[in-house]
Image: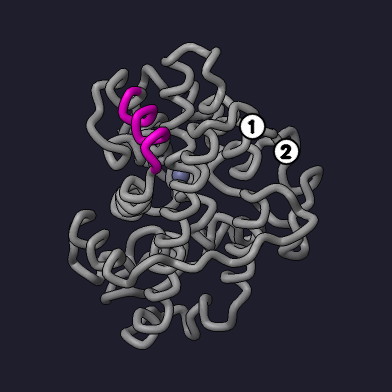
Amino acid sequence: MRSIHRGILLCLGLLATTPAFAWGPLGHRIVADLADAQLAPGARAQVDALLASEHMQSMADIANWADTLRDDPAQAALGKATAPLHYVNMHGSCDYKPALDCPDGQCVVGAINHYAAILGNRRLPVAARAQALNFVVHFVGDVNQPLHAGYQQDRGANDYQVQFDGQGSNLHRMWDSGLLSTRHLDALDYTALLQKQGPVTLPAPIAPLDNPPAQWAEESCKVVMNEGVYPQGHVIGQSYIERERPIAERQLRIAGKRLADLLNRVLGDSRTVSTPR
Ligand SMILES: [Zn+2]
C-alpha cells in the first residue's frame, strides 16, 4: 500500500515538474522536412554524412531526439542538463535581455548559437557535430513554437488549463500538438500541405539585434501577447482552431525556412560562425 502511495506521489511529482517540450513529434518532423527540402548542395552533403554517422536517414528522424533524452536512462544526465535549453522565459516584455532571460546561455537562444557553432566547426569530431545537428534541428523548432518564449509565470501556458474536445488539457500542449492534430495528417502529408502554400516570407531582421535566434524568440513572444491566444473561458472550440491553427502553421513554415538558412550558413562555404548569446 505504502509503495503504491509513493508511486502515485512520484507520478504526481513528475507531472508537476516535467515541462512539456515543444512541438510534439509531428511538429518537429514537419519543421525538419520543410527544412530538408530547402538545403543547398553543400549543406545537404554534410547533413547526410552526419546523419549517416548516426545511422539515420533524414532530419525528421532526429528531430525529436532531444525530447527523448530524459526517458532514456543512458542519456538522462544529458537530458537533465539540456532541459532548460528548450525554451526561454522572457521577463517583463518581449525584448530579449541576455543577462536576465538567458543567464550563462542556458535558454533556447543560447543553445541554438552554441550548437550551431559546434556543428559548423569542421575540426571537431563527427560525433560531436552530429549531436549538435540533433540539437539544432530540435531547438530551431522549439524557439518558433510561440509558447516556448511565453510568460514565465504560467510556464509557457503549461499551467493554463483548457478544455478541448471534451477533455482537459493545457494551452502549451494545445500549441505543441493539439492544434496540429486537428488536421489528421501525418508528417509527410502535413509537410506537403504547407509546401503548397509556397515559400514563406520571413520577418525582416531587427537591427541592431544581430542575434537571429533572439529575434525568433522575440517574435514568438509577441505571438503569445496577441489577443486570443489565451482562449476565453479556457475553452478551445472550432473558432479558436480556425483562428490560431494558421498561426501555428505559419510558425512551422518559418521554422523550416530558418532551419534551412542556418544549416546552409554554417555548413556552407563560410567557416566562421559567430556565437552571440
Ligand atoms: Zn523541445
Residue 79 shown left or right of residue 215 in the figure = left
- The segment highlighted magenta reads 40-49
Q: Is residue 220 above or below residue 62?
A: below
Q: Is residue 154 above or below residue 116?
A: below
Q: Is mark 2 within 8 Å of ligand 1?
A: no
Q: Which residue carries the number 1 mark? A: 273
Q: Is residue 121 above or below residue 162?
A: above
- Magenta span contains residue 45: yes
Percent across and percent down for residue 98 are 77, 45
Residue at 26% from the left image edge and 59% from the top image edge: 191
Percent across and percent down for residue 222 are 63, 69
Dot 1 crowding, Cα within 10 Å, few <14, some 14–19, many 20+: some
Residue at 49% from the left image edge and 58% from the top image edge: 145
| Mark 2 residue element | loop
Q: Along the line of sight, which residue is nearer the eye, 202 or 68? A: 202
Q: Which residue carries the number 2 mark? A: 276
- Magenta span contains residue 230: no
Percent across and percent down for residue 116 are 56, 33
Percent across and percent down for residue 111 are 59, 36
Q: How many marks?
A: 2
User: Which amino acid type is marked by label 2?
Assistant: Pro
Residue at 64% from the left image edge and 28% from the top image edge: 272
